[in-house]
Image: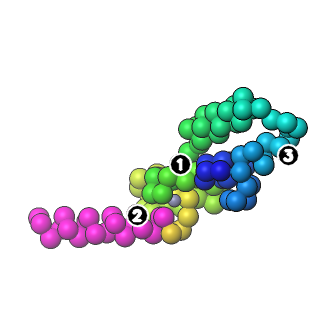
Amino acid sequence: MGNKEYVLWGTKPDETLEDFICAFTTNPTYEDIADLKKWADDTWDKLDKCPQCGEPLPDERERWSADDWSGKEYCSEDCARRVAEHNEQVEAKYASEV
Ligand SMILES: [Zn+2]
């Protein structure tokens, strides 16, 4: 099972898509599995993603900002810090060139 399904369903990383669907459906068909994969793709596309790492953003209260002006939100303190550090480097480079 890919990371996408793992995040969406909160299943264990070593659980397969077939294991997952068997918890809800006896004798799942290939169509059932294809439907689930399609649902995962569609749902995933609609989620807000972290601009830094591409993972879905957590609950709004648990998001992080790298600055006060861009309005961009990140999934973790780590992602926000990396962006803040990158921005500082860009600013320092710009300042040294002007
Ligand atoms: Zn992130």
Closest to the camera, between mark 2 and mark 1, is: 1
* Residue at mark 2: 83
- Inter-mark Cα distance, 1 to 3: 28 Å
Residue 32 lies, with reference to residue 15, above or below; the image says above
Residue depicted at 67% across the width and 33% down the height: 34
Provide the residue span drawn in magenta: 79-98
Give the quarter of the image for residue 26.
Answer: top right
Q: Position of residue 43 (x, y in %)?
A: 63, 37
Residue type at mark 1: give it: Lys
Residue 6 lies, with reference to residue 26, above or below; the image says below
For the C terminus, the image quarter is bottom left
- Inter-mark Cα distance, 3 to 2: 40 Å
- Which sits earlier in the primary sequence, circle 3 or circle 2? 3
* Residue at mark 1: 49
Q: Is residue 31 left or right of residue 98?
A: right
Asked if the residue under mark 3 is in contact with the one under mark 1, i.e. CB atoms within 8 Å, the reply is no
Q: Residue furthest top?
A: 31
Q: Position of residue 65 (x, y in %)?
A: 49, 60
